[in-house]
Image (spheres, grey):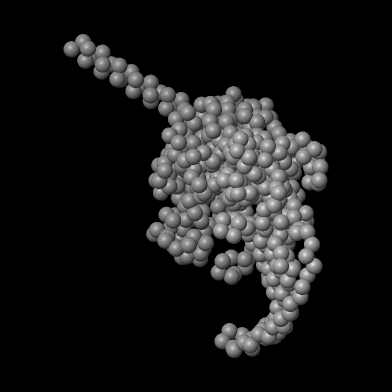
């Protein structure tokens, strides 16, 4: 009997301790009659970025994974609600069309709007609320020390924890999420906070409902040089801030993953925020985070590039290949792999991108998939060129034998509308050729075929289908075989006449002028030597 009583009392004591600890993890604040709760996140270390459970559909800006250590802090148990916004700002939240009510999250909020809100909130409470850093956001979303290593914040089943395009409307949407007109007909919108399952720390909606602003500047290469203790990116070159988490019309489950990082495309109807607070009281963010300022000087590649910046040409394993990319550029992806030199080892062609944020511009127009156009002033264009590293497998190490960092431009087109060029690289193991496909909106497409020779890829054939002007007066097809020394031309001379015809009219038979000529066979052009493909 005594033993049973001891066990019973022990159970009661432990239950009380658990309840007490749970209460200590949350602190409630009040503005006027509106209460909001902050959850304490116990500091610790975690692996930040595209960890294994995040799957294969990850982006280069989520790499490399790296260890981060954070101090204790508090984070909003929910996203900032419309009732709290009204209490702080002194005027009712009047946005409509995407969910309206006291318990709904705010949306259509810019980063500057959030800063104004924070200033007023701090004046009313005497605290120092702020936006969470990107690392704080991810650590909290992962569940902190209680993490069960889910893909999403609180579950591997997105429907359990998030409102997103498939479940945020009247019924489940089975069509392409890019067809936003169907989402409107289905009444997809935001939902009241804390109506889905919380994560391990009792925090809600970190992977859906509205995406959330963080305090960091966005640098897609930041993970390569991020400090390990309380990091925050503050860059004089950045032109926008970090957004984390998916939202109610996220077009796929990729954007709802914990490690997904985003730049703002348009914050209309989708973007809100949650609060953060340092656990030591009124502490300025500068006192608790390590601030990184990027160098503004940029070193352009040249024949002595590696000597100029002391960039390594070798690494020990394929996992270390991204470290071979100079800091002025970003590792984008492994374009293709193959046994380029026939030694039985897998070699790599790596895509790199310039990281100059001054080349990001706001586009005036944005063409939707259904053809309609509307003003999207917050649509950002990345006009940085792409390039490559040729990395050869030497058995005990990997070595860069060829590079060209800015050979594929990403320029704006005429007419006020931007269509990003597409670029695809693959290796054909049968022909032992590297194929590069590059097309640029209305101006045409280019195909290049290379063969490996002595640490380089050399151009053996190219085909071009190019327009002379944005509204083509004529189109020219060119096929040049450099090994055979033959160039073939085929010119469509009457394409301009097609623009006077409407749907249903019978087009005239196209007229071509064909010709062929021999070209002088000289040394083949190396991939690294051309500045613009």
Horizontally, residue 167 falls left or right of residue 424, namely left
Can residue 457 be seen at all in this image of the molecule?
A: yes
How many labels, in total? 0
Tell me residue 311's x, y (percent): 74, 37
Residue farthest along the top direction in this orientation: 2
Tell me residue 379's x, y (percent): 65, 57
Residue 399 placement: quadrant: top right
Taking depth in this image into account, of 504 and 248 the one nearest to the observer is: 504
Quadrant of image for the N terminus:
top left
Taking depth in this image into account, of 230 and 330 the one nearest to the observer is: 330
Tell me residue 514's x, y (percent): 71, 81
Instruction: Residue at 44%, 39% (x, y): give it.
Output: 150
Taking depth in this image into account, of 201 and 346 the one nearest to the observer is: 346
**Looking at the image, residue 49 lies above or below residue 268:** above
Instruction: Residue at 59%, 69% (x, y): give it.
Output: 372
Can residue 233 be seen at all in this image of the molecule?
A: no
Horizontally, residue 18 falls left or right of residue 352, namely left
Instruction: Residue at 58%, 27% (x, y): give it.
Output: 69
Tell me residue 523's x, y (percent): 78, 59
Residue 169 placement: quadrant: bottom left
Quadrant of image for the C terminus:
bottom right
Horizontally, residue 498 falls left or right of residue 259, namely right
**Looking at the image, residue 132 lies above or below residue 25:** below
**Looking at the image, residue 247 lies above or below residue 12:** below
Instruction: Residue at 71%, 34% (x, y): give it.
Output: 292
Residue farthest along the left direction in this orientation: 1
């Amino acid at each position: 009997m005594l033993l049973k009583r001891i066990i019973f009392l022990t159970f009661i004591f432990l239950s009380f301790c658990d309840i007490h600890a749970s209460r200590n993890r949350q602190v409630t604040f009040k503005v006027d009659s509106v209460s909001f709760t902050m959850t304490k996140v116990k500091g610790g270390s975690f692996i930040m970025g595209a960890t294994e459970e995040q799957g294969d559909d990850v982006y280069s800006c989520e790499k490399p994974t790296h260890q981060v250590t954070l101090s204790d802090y508090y984070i909003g148990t929910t996203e900032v609600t419309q009732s709290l916004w009204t209490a702080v700002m002194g005027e009712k939240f009047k946005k409509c069309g995407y969910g309206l009510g006291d318990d709904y999250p705010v949306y259509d909020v810019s980063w500057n709007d959030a800063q104004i809100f924070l200033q007023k909130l701090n004046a009313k409470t005497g605290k120092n609320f702020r936006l969470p850093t990107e690392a704080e956001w991810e650590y909290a979303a992962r569940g902190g020390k209680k993490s069960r290593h889910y893909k999403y914040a609180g579950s591997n089943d997105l429907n359990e924890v998030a409102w997103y395009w498939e479940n945020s409307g009247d019924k489940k949407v089975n069509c392409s999420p890019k067809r936003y007109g169907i989402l409107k007909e289905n009444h997809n919108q935001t939902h009241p906070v804390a109506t889905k399952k919380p994560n391990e720390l009792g925090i809600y909606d970190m992977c859906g409902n509205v995406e959330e602003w963080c305090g960091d500047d966005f640098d897609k290469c930041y993970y390569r040089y991020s400090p390990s203790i309380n990091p925050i990116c503050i860059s004089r070159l950045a032109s926008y801030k970090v957004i984390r988490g998916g939202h109610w019309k996220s077009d796929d489950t990729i954007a709802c993953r914990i490690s997904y990082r985003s730049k703002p495309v348009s914050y209309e109807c989708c973007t809100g925020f949650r609060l953060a607070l340092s656990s030591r009281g009124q502490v300025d963010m500068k006192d608790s985070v390590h601030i990184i300022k990027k160098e503004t000087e940029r070193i352009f590649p040249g024949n002595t590039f590696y000597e100029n910046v002391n960039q390594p040409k070798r690494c020990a394993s394929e996992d270390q290949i991204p470290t071979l990319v100079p800091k002025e550029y970003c590792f984008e992806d492994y374009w293709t792999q193959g046994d380029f030199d026939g030694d039985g080892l897998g070699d790599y062609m790596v895509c790199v991108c310039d990281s100059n944020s001054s080349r990001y511009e706001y586009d005036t127009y944005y063409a939707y998939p259904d053809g309609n156009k509307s003003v999207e002033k917050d649509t950002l264009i990345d006009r940085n060129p792409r390039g490559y590293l040729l990395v050869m497998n030497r058995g005990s190490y990997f070595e860069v034998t060829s590079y060209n960092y800015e050979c594929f431009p990403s320029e704006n087109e005429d007419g006020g509308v931007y269509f990003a060029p597409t670029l695809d690289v693959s290796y054909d193991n049968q022909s032992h050729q590297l194929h590069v496909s590059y097309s640029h909106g209305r101006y045409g497409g280019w195909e290049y075929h290379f063969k490996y020779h002595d640490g380089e890829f050399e151009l053996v054939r190219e085909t071009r289908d190019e327009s002379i002007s944005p509204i083509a007066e004529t189109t020219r097809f060119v096929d040049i075989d450099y090994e055979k020394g033959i160039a073939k031309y085929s010119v469509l001379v009457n394409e301009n006449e097609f623009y006077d015809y409407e749907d249903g009219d019978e087009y005239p038979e196209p007229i071509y002028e064909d010709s062929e000529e021999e070209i002088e066979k000289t040394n083949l052009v190396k991939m690294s030597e051309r500045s613009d493909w």
